[in-house]
Amino acid sequence: MRHIKFFFLLFGLCCFSSTTSFAQTSAATTESQEVVEADKTIKVKVKGVGCSRDLKAILNNVGSVIGVRTCETLKKGATTTFSVTYNPTVASEKAIYSAVEATPGCSNQTARPYKVKL
């Protein structure tokens, strides 16, 4: 009987100490979420995208801009829409637009066929 009481006491202490450590973990998680919330997401509409190699080239070029977290295609077509998430303290919309328009065409590496539609 003494062992059972000791076991429950020990179990209660373990539960109490683990609850305290979870509280500390959630505070750290909240702080890191605040950093993520500072990111900004914009939709960039681009004319001139004709094939999947064009998409890949634009995604890579925009993704190489310092401060850009993600770049993905939302809608393909005559005007292709990209979703770009970036840190506005490091990158700017203008830098992202410039990266899109500076991307060389897949068939002619000297041409810059992509235009951002504002």
Image (cartoon, grey):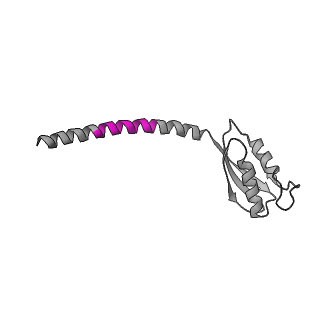
Residue 51 percent coordinates (x, y): 77, 64
Q: Residue at x 45, y 35 (%)?
A: 27
In reply to whether residue 16 is colored magenta, the answer given is yes
Q: Position of residue 42 (x, y in %)?
A: 69, 47
Nearer to the camera, 56 or 27: 56
Task: Please tell me whether the stretch drawn in magenta is mainly helix, strand or loop.
Answer: helix
| Left or right, 92 with reference to 36 | right
Furthest-left residue in view? Answer: 1
Q: Quadrant of the N terminus?
A: top left
Q: Position of residue 95 (x, y in %)?
A: 77, 42
The residue located at (76%, 56%) in the rendering is: 57
The residue drawn where x is 74% and y is 59% is 55
Q: How many marks?
A: 0
User: Range of the magenta residues?
Assistant: 14-27
Hey, which quadrant is residue 6 in on the image? Answer: top left
Residue at horizontal 75%, vertical 45%? 96
Nearer to me, 9 or 71: 9
